[in-house]
Image (cartoon, rainbow, N blue to C red):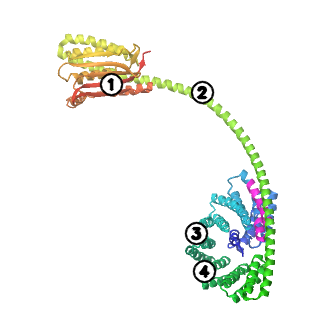
Amino acid sequence: MRTKLTLFLFLFLSFVLQAQNNVVLDSLELQLKSVKNDIDKAKTLNALANQYKYFDPKKMVQYANDALLLSKRIKYHNEEAYAYLNIGVSNIITGDYKLAMDNFILAKSVFEDIQLSNTNAEEVQMGLAKTYGTMGIVFSEQSNYPKALQYYLKSVKLYENLKEEENCAKIYNNIGVVYKAQSTYFKALEYFIKAQKIQERLSDSNIGITFTNIANIYFSQKNNEKAIEYYNLAKASLDKNEDFRALGEWYNNMGLYYEQSGNSNKAIESWKSAIVTFEKVGDRFGLTDTYIYIAQFYLRKEKLHDALQVVNKALVLATEVDVLEQKVLAEKLLSTIYEKQGDVSNALLHLKRYSVAKDSLTNEENIRKAVEAEMNYEFDKKEIIQREENSKKELRLKQESESLKMKLLYGTLIAILLFSVGFLIFNRMQLKKRFTLQKELAEYEQKALHLQMNPHFVFNCLGSISSFIVQNGTDSAIKYLAKFSKLMRLTLEYSKETLIPIDKEIESIRNYLELEQLRFNHKFNFTIHKSDEIEDDVALPPLIIQPFVENAIIHGVIPNKGIGSILLDFSIVNDMLICKVIDDGVGINQSKKNKEGSVIAHKSMALDIIQKRLEMIASTTSKTATLEINERVERNISLGTNVVLTLPLQYAQ
C-alpha cells in the first residue's frame, strides 16, 4: 500500500503545475531570444526550467543545465545555485534521489558561500529555504525522518523571516506528514492547523489537502465528530479546485471512515466514487489502492466472489505499474480468498507468488536501504567536508574582517585621541573663561543687589530724621544727624565690598538700633549676642540683617504697648552661620493686618532684594542660603516674631 507521504510531498513540489500555461512559457521563450546580457539570460533559463517542473522533466533539466553552464562561465553564483536546485528537483521527478541530493548539496554549498559575504540578500535566503525544503523531501521519501525534520525546520525558519506565508504553509504541511508517519499525532495536528490558518487567509487552493490531513489525524485518534467536520471542509475545497488525484484519495479515506463507522453502503459508495475519480486522470496507482480496499472489505464481509473479482483487477493494475508493495497485498488476498473457498490449489499457487513477491519486496527494500545508507553516509561525509570548508572560509573572512576592524579601530582611536586632546585644551580654556565670567557676574550682581539696599536704607533713615525733627526739635535732630552720618560713612564703605567681617556688620546694626532708640524715645531695648565659636574673620554680605531689624522695630515693637525688646543672635551650626532677629512685638500676623489697614500704601522692596541676594549667595557658594520668618506663639497668644537667616560660612579675605 502506498504511503501518504508521496501524495503530500508531491503537492509541495508541484504547486506550479496548476499555474502552468502556454502563455507563461511562450513569454519566457520570447524573452530568452530577446535578452541581451548574460545575467538576464541565466535568470530566464532558470525561470524556464522552473516552469517545466512536473510538466516536462527533460526540458526542465535541459534549461537548468544551460543556466548552470552560463552562470559558471560568467561567475554568477546566485543563478548557479538555482540551476543546481532545478536539476535536483528534476532528479526527484525521475526518481534518482542520489543524484538529486548531490545537486542539492552543491546548491546549498553555493548559497551558503554567498550568504557568508551577503547575509541580508533576500534572494539568497529564498534559495536556501527552497534547497533545505527539497532536501527534506528526499529524506522524507527515504523515511529518514530526523534528517527530514532538521531540513524542514531550517527551511521554514527562513521562510518565516522572509514573510513567505504560502511556502511556510507547504513546509508546515510536510512537517505534519512526517510527524504523522511517526504516529506523533499531536505534533502532526499542530503543524497541519498552522498550515490551515495561513491557507485560509491566503485562499490557497491546496487547503483541501490540509483539511484531509487534519481529518485523517482525528480519524486516527477515533475522534469521528471532528474527523467528519474536516472531511466535509476538504470535499468542498477539492470540488472547487478540481484536484482529482487528491479527491480520489479523499474518497478512499471516506471509505475507511464509513467502514469503521459501520456504514457499509456508504463505504462502498465512497470507494466507487474514488474509482471514477482516478479513472478521469488515469491514476492506476490510486485505482490499485482502491480495489485493494474494496477487496479487503468484501473479504471481511465473507463476500468471497466479489472480493475475488475486485482483487484480480488490483493485481492486473499492480503488475502494470510494477509496484511490488501492491502485488504483495493482492497475492496475499487471493491466497486467503481461495483458501476460504476451499480451492487449495489456487490458494497454494498465490501463496507461492506472494512469497516470491514479498522476497522481491524485501530485497528491494534492502537494496533501497543500502542505497539510502550509502547516500546518507555520502551526504554526512559531504556535510562534514563542507562544514570544514565553510569553517575555514568563515575563519579566513573573520580574520580579514578582524584585521580590517583593528586597523579601522586604531585609526579611529588615534583620530579620537587627537580630537579629544584638542577639544580638552579648547574646552578647558573656554571653561576657565566662563567660570571667571560667572564669578565676576555673580559678584557684580550681588554688589548691585546690596547697593539697592543703600537707597532703601537711606530713605528710611531720612524719614526717621524728618520725623525726629518734627517731634523733638532742632537740637535733638542735630545729634541724631551726627549718628546718622557716622552710620552712612560705614554703610558707604561697606557697600563696596561683597563680604564684610561680622563685627563690622554688628557695629553698623548697633549704630542703627541706637538711632532708632533716639527716634522713638527708648521705646525698646536691644541685645546683640555673638557666639564664641564665631571667629573674627567670619564674614557676611553687608546690609543683609538690617531690614529685619527695621521690621522688628517699625512693625513689631513700636505698635505694641509698653517697652519692647529686640534680640540679635549670631551662632554657627553645622558649618552654617545662623543669624536670628527676635522681637516681642505684635507679631507678623497682626503686623500684616496693620499694613492692610494703613491709609498710606507702602511697598517694601527689602524682602524681595534679600531673597535675590540669597539666591546669588547659593549660586556662588553651591550651598543653601535660607530665610525663615515665624510668629512666636504660646497658648494661642502671639509673643512676637522670630526671623532666622541661614548663610553659608564664609570668611573675609
How crowded is the residue under tag 3: few (<14 C-alpha within 10 Å), some, or many (20+)?
few
- The three-letter code of the residue at mark 1 reads Val
Q: CA distance from mark 2 to mark 1?
A: 46 Å
Above or below, comparing residue 634 to residue 234 in the picture: above
Q: Which mark is residue 644?
A: 1
Label whose residue precedes the other's in the sequence (1 or 3):
3
> Which structural element holds mark 4?
helix
Cα separation, mark 3 vs mark 4, equals 27 Å
Query: Looking at the picture, how far across and down is residue 263, in whole percent?
Result: 59, 83
Residue 399 highlighted magenta (yes or no): no
Magenta-colored span: 87-113
The kind of residue tagged 2 is Ile
Three-letter amino acid code at disc 4?
Answer: Tyr
Q: From the image, tell me which residue sits under label 3.
A: 200
The residue indicated by pointer 4 is 258
* Mark pair 1, 3: CA separation: 81 Å
> Residue under circle 2?
425
Q: Position of residue 618 (x, y in %)?
A: 42, 26
